[in-house]
Amino acid sequence: MTALEILKQHEIKKTPARMSMIYLLQSAKYPMSEYEIKEQMADLYDRVTFYRNVQTLSTAGIIHKIVADNTTVRYALNCCEHGHNHTAEHAHFFCETCKNVVCLNQLKIPAYDLPSGYKFADCDVIIKGTCEKCNHE
Amino acid sequence: MTALEILKQHEIKKTPARMSMIYLLQSAKYPMSEYEIKEQMADLYDRVTFYRNVQTLSTAGIIHKIVADNTTVRYALNCCEHGHNHTAEHAHFFCETCKNVVCLNQLKIPAYDLPSGYKFADCDVIIKGTCEKCNHE
DNA sequence: ACTATCTTTGCAACATTGTTTCATTTGAAT
DNA sequence: ATTCAAATGAAACAATGTTGCAAAGATAGT
């Protein structure tokens, strides 16, 4: 699906900043940091616009924000399959050496039983350690 | 166990800042934010010292740091039972309304199978939603 | 095409969180 | 008491995120 199609599908206006954010994340192998996005967006990049679009795109379900650590935030595109957005919740791996984050799509997040009276909204699972590449160096 | 005993057990020097941090966390019902700690430590409080002691105490396993969100960090004392420190990994609940964090000691974190080559170090589980109190208001 | 309206953007300023460096103070062992 | 490493405080800095407001851009109605 193209960036434009994604925006149309969610009835979000096409703007250069949004288009290139989606492009970038589509071509990324891993969830990207703000810094990486900033580097690649160059002149199109304004911090405030970025944060506002992160907000817009993530409430629409187009991207998701991964908090690996309080100082390590990454952004990734949700998989848009079969014409609608369908991303099962999965765990994320954070390599403490190279600071990269990887989506572990195969690791689904189990349902947790909350104490009575508690309402569930969302669950984040971050597994920390060292990635394959860093282990072989 | 007293704050002093905890420090001695881990061979960490007794200083006023460390003592009162442990006191505070011992008396806290919930994991505390830096702001709450700061309020209560008043003149004993210096930001740099705080961060350094968070580092010292958490690598010693005396406290743990809970990242509920990139802008929401909480600190909690680990349970020190039977004379040694023994805290099974448990999930945490983050109330999106009141921003409180609760340790869900009963929710143990399952073992996840990582892709080959990946080395496991740690796993954080954050469940988001609304807490009992906020649901009844 | 023209205007009115709403959304998005860019900029400036600010707030919060965390780190580094370095001189000084303190803890605790002898 | 002396000593020496460890801990502290202060200043400066860096990164991250937010708010208010004016300008620019897109959209719809006439």
Image (tube, coloured by chain):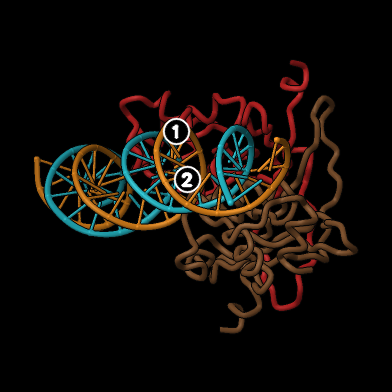
Chain colours: A brown, B red, C cyan, D orange
What residue appears at the point 67 percent right and 28 percent down from the top-left corner?
B97
Task: Say if B36 sits above or below A121 in the image.
Answer: above
Q: Secondary structure at mark 2?
A: helix
Determine the residue located farthest toward the bottom in the rendered image.
A137
Query: Which chain is home to disc 1?
Result: B
Kind of residue sitting beneath label 2: Leu
What residue appears at the point 71 percent right and 37 percent down from the top-left corner?
B93
What residue appears at the point 77 percent right and 17 percent down from the top-left corner?
B136
Q: How far apart are the alpha carbons under marks 2 and 1?
A: 10 Å
Task: Say if A105 sits above or below B116 in the image.
Answer: above
Of the residues under marks 2 and 1, which one precedes in the sequence? 1
Counting from the top left corner in percent of width and height, residue A48 is at 49, 49
Counting from the top left corner in percent of width and height, residue A49 is at 52, 51
Viewport quadrant of the C terminus of chain A: bottom right
Q: Which mark is residue B21?
A: 1
Rate crowding at label 2 as few (under 14), some (14 to 19) or many (20 or more) other CA atoms within 10 Å. many
Q: Nearer the viewer, residue A90 or D19?
A: D19
Marks 2,1: beta carbons within 8 A? yes
Counting from the top left corner in percent of width and height, residue A9 is at 80, 55
Q: Which mark is residue B99?
A: none
Q: Which mark is residue B57?
A: 2
Determine the residue located farthest toward the right in the rendered image.
A82
Determine the residue located farthest toward the top in the rendered image.
B137
Q: Which of the 4 quarters of the picture holds residue A82?
A: bottom right
Query: Which chain is home to disc 2?
Result: B
Viewport quadrant of the N terminus of chain A: bottom right
Kind of residue sitting beneath label 1: Met
Left or right, B40 with reference to D25:
left
Is residue B84 at all visible to an observer of this figure?
no
Q: Nearer the viewer, residue B109 or A35?
A: A35
